[in-house]
Image: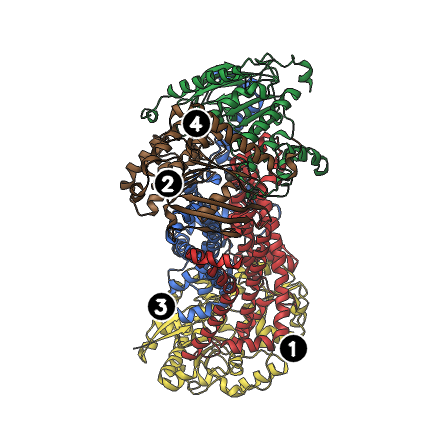
Chain colours: A green, B brown, C yellow, D red, E blue
Amino acid sequence: MQEKVAQAPASASGKGPMLLALRGVGKIFSNGVTALSDVDLTIREGDFLSLLGPSGCGKSTALRLIAGLATPTSGLLDWRGSSSFDRSNIGFVFQEPTLLPWADVFDNVWLPLRLKGVSRAKAAPVVMEMLARVHLTGFENAVPRELSGGMKMRVSIARAMVTKPRVLLMDEPFAALDEITRFKLNNDLLELWQDERFTVVFVTHSVFESVFLSNRVVVMAARPGRVFREIAIDAPYPRNEAFRTSPDYAALCRQASDVLIGAINSTAGPHHDGH
Amino acid sequence: MQEKVAQAPASASGKGPMLLALRGVGKIFSNGVTALSDVDLTIREGDFLSLLGPSGCGKSTALRLIAGLATPTSGLLDWRGSSSFDRSNIGFVFQEPTLLPWADVFDNVWLPLRLKGVSRAKAAPVVMEMLARVHLTGFENAVPRELSGGMKMRVSIARAMVTKPRVLLMDEPFAALDEITRFKLNNDLLELWQDERFTVVFVTHSVFESVFLSNRVVVMAARPGRVFREIAIDAPYPRNEAFRTSPDYAALCRQASDVLIGAINSTAGPHHDGH
Amino acid sequence: NEKVTFGTNWLAQAEHGGYYQAAADGTYAACGLDVTIMQGGPQVSGRPLLLAGKIDFYMGGNMLQAFDAVQQDIPLRVVAASFQKEPQVIMSHPGQGLDKWEDLKNADQYIIGDEGAQSFFQWMITEFGFDPAKRVPYTFNPAPFIANKKSIQQGYVTSEPYAVAKEGGFQPNLFLLADYGFDTYATTIETMQATIDKRPEVVQCFVDGSAKGWYNYLYGDNAAANAAIKKDNPDISDEQIAFSIEQMKKFGIVDSGDTEKLGIGAMTEERIQSFYDKMVKAKVVPDDIDIKKSYTLAFVNKGVGIELKK
Amino acid sequence: MTAIEEHALTLDPEEARRVRQERLERIGRWLLPLAIMILAIWLWDRICVWNDIPKYILPRPGVVLQTLFDDAGLLFSSLLVTLKITFLSLLLAVIGGVGLAVLFAQSKWVEMSFFPFAIVLQVTPIVAIFPLINIYVDNQTTKLLLCAWIVAFFPILSNTTLGLNSVDRNLRDMFKLNGATRWQQLRYLRLPAAMPYFLGGLKIAGGLSLIGAVVAEFVAGAQGQSSGLASRIIEAGYRLNAPRLFAALILISFTGILIFLVLSLISHLILRRWHESALKQER
Amino acid sequence: MTAIEEHALTLDPEEARRVRQERLERIGRWLLPLAIMILAIWLWDRICVWNDIPKYILPRPGVVLQTLFDDAGLLFSSLLVTLKITFLSLLLAVIGGVGLAVLFAQSKWVEMSFFPFAIVLQVTPIVAIFPLINIYVDNQTTKLLLCAWIVAFFPILSNTTLGLNSVDRNLRDMFKLNGATRWQQLRYLRLPAAMPYFLGGLKIAGGLSLIGAVVAEFVAGAQGQSSGLASRIIEAGYRLNAPRLFAALILISFTGILIFLVLSLISHLILRRWHESALKQER
Ligand SMILES: Nc1ncnc2c1ncn2[C@@H]1O[C@H](COP(=O)(O)OP(=O)(O)OP(=O)(O)O)[C@@H](O)[C@H]1O
Ligand SMILES: Nc1ncnc2c1ncn2[C@@H]1O[C@H](COP(=O)(O)OP(=O)(O)OP(=O)(O)O)[C@@H](O)[C@H]1O
Ligand SMILES: [Mg+2]
Ligand SMILES: [Mg+2]
């Protein structure tokens, strides 16, 4: 809320105050896999930052580091400006739905609010609104195993957004959705973002999606996972169907695509040689 | 193998002998949800059929019915021509990776062969080749929890293909992969399909992918799940990057997209009204 | 030599001395038996083995169970009574108002084992007004008795009083049940009618051997028997054994009354009948049991071994 | 409709087999166990007859049944006494087991420090420590409960601890991220997730608390007049009254089976919406 | 590097707290349980002294320790006898429990038909049926094993059955699709999936087979020289040799803890690569 006031009007490249900087961050898992190596990345308040990169390049790992669910084995995370950033201000959409299997859809979405002490009755309107946003009205009482893959993912998205977090970390939230629904949700998300000016770090596999949504696209390369190139998407917001069909968009997509191809080809390791 | 001989040369629309027909198939789950209603669909040998449709429209359910993992509550499946079709000739890529959590990547891919009595040593070259195809060389000894989401999915794909099944059912196999890798795997799959002439039923959310790969796209609509329209993709095989940039392709994609929008809008139910 | 097995009802102790003696010094062997002694324990019951014919002889506690057997149509016979007196005592703390038999029922707690509860305690209830609600099981550890001055506990006159005196540091009052009318024979030798019918000589040999064994154990050199006892039950101490023997002599447990003439193991019809009548009167057993079926005097009262008494 | 279905049956023999088997299974599910039970009883009878086993060793089932009828008053009032201890001790086992498991789940320290004591309780023979209990506990019911509880609590503790530690990592992360307190994490995540394990432990503990109640009475004795089945067994054993002994045993066995069935039902009702072990295979 | 890390510590107090706690935990994990154990023993001693508890009721730990030393020969040879029965019966419990669970997993019919018998075994007091065993089983070791087995097998059976029924539905479908035989499904899917449950049952059964061995000996009696700890306990109790009694109890307790630790280690080694309960929280 305060951010909205403190914030410069909607702009393309992040000009907000710095929220978080990853400085030389590396992550080596105990089995010896280097998931991330020497990642430098600055995230500004109000950024819509997309992470793009081949499978296994460390996108999810980066998100987990940012959320504080994992700690870097080298380097550091600098939450300057909000030195003790309250992690319950983070909304996280995991790559897998991660729902409580024993709770129904309503309870799953209610959960974050419940943990903050909001009663069922009080939470109900908010929860129902979020469910409507992800087109799940009518499924409040279904348990996860009665849902399709995409529906589960949408419950997960609703849950992450229900608290109106200041920072939203999303790990391929729309991967399991058809393109039309995906576009709709893209638009919804952008609208919301412009209204509330939270910060988004968005992992996606779709070049189109990343360009359409974000003001910055960070392309990562694998083995070891690292930042390959950063692309500023300087198109103005609001973006809509017109933007989606504009030549600017196409050009940016091509550019991002080329960078991604570069990233994939730069990947060391034997398994890409054959192709 | 015999199919290859019996088969007319690679053609766009399915002209092979009928493999399976769904006749008025409906599926109502015990919680009362109608997942499928009155679905008629004929699958010919050698078809590459894509199922396209909004989330929750019953694509996965249809695949499970075909595989015999579920039974229709009305209508019937007609495996004419191969009256007692051997289900172990089916390869299935589940929507979720569905790996054995205690087994490493090699063992997971080896599993279908192992169940057919193939020893580790004998299976090794095949397994390693499949792993190379999905770019996972070097990860043979990792267990699933040490893999990224996309890597898990690729293991699952490798597992489904390792037995060289006659029928391949794939439930959004590439959804968790970046576009570049996805394109590569698309090409690989097509090549393989043309060589071996197995039958593919392919669930995807990507209009582009469905058009690029298949000779028939079946668009489904939700609530109740049903076949909305079938689109024949009459472009000749082999298809390659040239096809991907051709105006034909773009037109077909636009057509499929429009049908999909129609399907989504035709969906009954309250949750789409607000949008 | 014919192999026979004798089951006792407790871990090896001096109260089984006569049998160990006869087994150790060759008395049984002399009349053609190769006897194995199978020791029992607090939760071990050998009687079913006797009933099933897996063992040949079993050590009965008192006559009541023999009566029960008749009642259940079980062809089980008492062939000899090693103890003329039931060595069972009730112990109480001195100076706690529990110094007289009549006062014992006022104790806070009666610590009585399961078997006791089914036999002499029934008699104590009906005959002397003990309160069944105050009974707690005796798990064969006298610590609760020592700890609770207002409690009474069962015990063998030959055994528990020693441990209580040694560890508790006081001499408990001892009330020998036999002195208050519970005049059953004890530590009997039981066998099945089939054994008596088919192998009377074996029964005779065992009864005679046991009698001789007891004489030798009580009055002769019992070192070998004690060694055998300690082998079976390494926890038992020499002092304890000495105490038990002394008490058996002092109270005439094994050798007193009828045994003077009839020899160890003696039983008389009159005594059994009189005990039965008492128990009927106390409503411990029904009055329609043909107790003649519970014993036979064919193998005892022959004065065997009296000459060994020094 | 039926025509179509029949058509399906001819078309797909595997399917046909499945349907037939399902129908059979529905009947067999209740009939077969009953048949086996009857067969077992018949076999018991035959064994007694064939081997000429005298009734004071192993009475024939008919005799036992007769006794069960004749002594019904005595036996069932005893059963009630035993059942009281059983249920109370099961309740205590649940409270104690879950309570301790929750405590242990708080930190590895606490677990490592106090689990040994739980094991000591589990492996200590009650007979051996009963004198201590007898000296320091006055109330008879308390003594019985304590003994029965010692026998029954461990499986619940062990299984619940395992369950609390088996929570999916991603869900745990999700809770952490949402700033859940320890208590909330326990209440909304770990306890529900541990449910299947806990219920498994409960099913073990159900039988154990019954046997615990019997053993407790063996060791701690009857409570005045109102003596439970253990006293009946001891008495019958001492009196060489085998039919009554077996009647009491049969009563205990059926009670055990009943407790198990009830606990299974509870378990099924709690888990049926989400846990694999309770889900109906929907096809 | 350290400079950077220190910088990180100042920047993120939560992180700093975590690191500190981790370090503490690593030490505390072994130190604390030891300290608590020592504290408990000290408390035991104090209670004895404060309340003037005579040594025939509850001897002071020093005395018990002394006895443990003095009677080491006797006690440890008895322990060995008991341990033999314990391990053999645990082995049989594993074989029997898993075997039955596998059998029951074959079909609901079999489970419904034979589970009742397993429950009957679980709830039958050994004391009551021992006479029967005693009559029909000749070998003393067999008798003891049978008793201990009856006590120990049920948790393994129950937990393994639960585990075999808790297999993920999708994995089951995958096997079905690949034409896995019943045996293959068991071997490659259900048994590995049931592992965590089985190991949980094993941890319960470990203690139970120890107590089962002791109880068996209580019931079946000692046999000549090679008598186990139960005989020591009975006789020591009867003779009011409390120090020896408690020395024997302590020996049983420590054996129980040791068995539990060993089984926990085995469980950890088997599960550590994949199951939540054994995974190190990697951050
Ligand atoms: N728990 C773990 N233990 C060991 N290695 C891991 C673990 N999690 C991930 N990795 C490894 O770290 C690397 C990066 O994984 P990550 O999940 O961050 O990839 P990603 O970019 O999200 O991929 P995807 O797009 O497929 O989800 C991979 O090589 C993976 O094998
Ligand atoms: N086991 C089940 N029990 C009850 N309802 C179910 C079950 N599985 C699926 N459904 C319902 O059936 C419908 C179709 O599900 P299905 O998984 O086939 O959708 P889908 O087309 O694969 O969707 P997605 O693209 O999101 O994966 C959904 O409405 C879902 O809620
Ligand atoms: Mg990922
Ligand atoms: Mg689906």
For the residues labelled 4 and 2, the Cα–Cα distance comes to 30 Å
- Circles 2 and 3 on the same subunit: no
Ligand 1 lies under 8 Å from the Cβ of mark 4: yes
The numbered dot on residue C127 is 1
Amino acid identity at mark 4: Ser
The numbered dot on residue B46 is 2
Tally the numbered discs. Answer: 4
How far across and down, in percent of the image, does residue C125 sit? 64, 74
Q: Which residue is mark 4?
A: A55
Would you call the spot at circle 1 few (<14 residues within 10 Å), some (14-19), or many (20 or more)? some
Check disc 4 and report its element: helix, strand or loop: loop
Ligand 2 lies under 8 Å from the Cβ of mark 1: no
Frontmost residue, A263 versus A98: A263
Would you call the spot at circle 3 few (<14 residues within 10 Å), some (14-19), or many (20 or more)? some
For the residues labelled 1 and 4, the Cα–Cα distance comes to 91 Å
Q: Which residue is mark 3?
A: C224
- Disc 4 vs disc 2: which is toward the camera? 2
